[in-house]
Structures are given as structure tokens and as C-alpha cells.
Image (tube, rainbow, N blue to C red):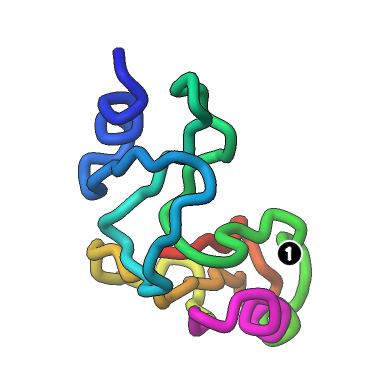
Amino acid sequence: MTRLSVVEKENRKVNAIVLKDGTPVTKDFRCDRVWVWVDDHGRVVRAPTVGIGKEAWPELVGKKGEEAAEVIESENKFVRAIIILEGTPTTKEINCARVRVWVDACDYVVTAPYVG
């Protein structure tokens, strides 16, 4: 199985692109693209990621919702944190500029927030 097929199998919404480490790339942020950086021998030298900046905040579980939202937006300037009460219906589309912060009735984060 190739690097591309592994990435694309695990996330069918992205297009994996293999690049030699050091290749200049555009700075445009896209949810549907993953760069796989390899050395001269084709070995992956950097972990592929979908976006720019931090993508998950497991350390915020148990924190207050507002505090978590502030941390998220300060650590990744490309996203907006949205506080949502646990159990609230939401859409299922992926949005790489959004982080849902799920809180309980006392406003404590109940699941690890992540980009999407």
C-alpha cells in the first residue's frame, strides 16, 4: 500500500500529494489536501496533516467552555471555536475553519475539541 493510498483510505475527503522535503508550496489552507513530505529515498519525513496549526485539544476536557474557546483561537488563528451544549443537533459537514467545543450543562468541556 502506498503512502497516498493509506492517507486517502483513512480520510476519503482528502487528496494526498507527495512532495520532496523542502519543496516550496502555497500557503493556502485547504481541508481537502494533505501534503506527504518524503526524502530522496521516498521515506516520509514529516507527519502528514490536513491543516495549518494545531488541530486537536484533548487537554481542554474538563475546562470551562469560554476558556477552552480562547485557548483554541489563540493556538490556531485559522479557526473559530463554537461552544455547543452536549446533545445539540448539528450538521455533519466538515469545516476546517471550525472547532466545536462540546460542553455539559455546567459549561465544562466534555469531549476533546478538534478542527472540523
Q: Nearer the viewer, residue 3 or 112?
A: 3
18 is higher (above) or lower (below) than 14: above
Residue 58 location (% of width, % of height): 69, 54
Is disc 1 placed on a helix, strand or loop?
helix
Q: What is the magenta segment's predominant secondary structure?
A: helix
Quadrant (top left/top right/bottom left/bottom right) for the N terminus: top left
Quadrant (top left/top right/bottom left/bottom right) for the C terminus: bottom left
Q: For the point 61% across and 70% down, which residue is it?
A: 104
In which quadrant of the rendered view does residue 4 lie? top left
In which quadrant of the rendered view does residue 33 lie? bottom left
Q: For the point 49% across and 72% down, which residue is it?
A: 99
Q: For the point 30% across and 40% down, which residue is it?
A: 11
Q: Nearer the viewer, residue 82 or 110?
A: 82
Q: Is residue 90 magenta?
A: no
Q: Nearer the viewer, residue 55 or 100?
A: 55
Residue 108 falls left or right of residue 113:
right
Residue 29 location (% of width, % of height): 38, 71
Q: Is residue 82 visible?
A: no
Residue most extreme to the top: 1
Q: Is residue 71 magenta?
A: yes
Q: For the point 43% across and 75% down, which residue is it?
A: 98
Q: What residue sits right under mark 1 in the picture?
A: 60
85 is higher (above) or lower (below) than 109: below
Residue 69 location (% of width, % of height): 64, 82
Three-letter code for the amino acid on which mark 1 is drawn? Leu
In which quadrant of the rendered view does residue 51 lie? bottom left
Q: Is residue 46 visible?
A: yes
The stretch in magenta equals 68-80
Residue 47 location (% of width, % of height): 55, 39
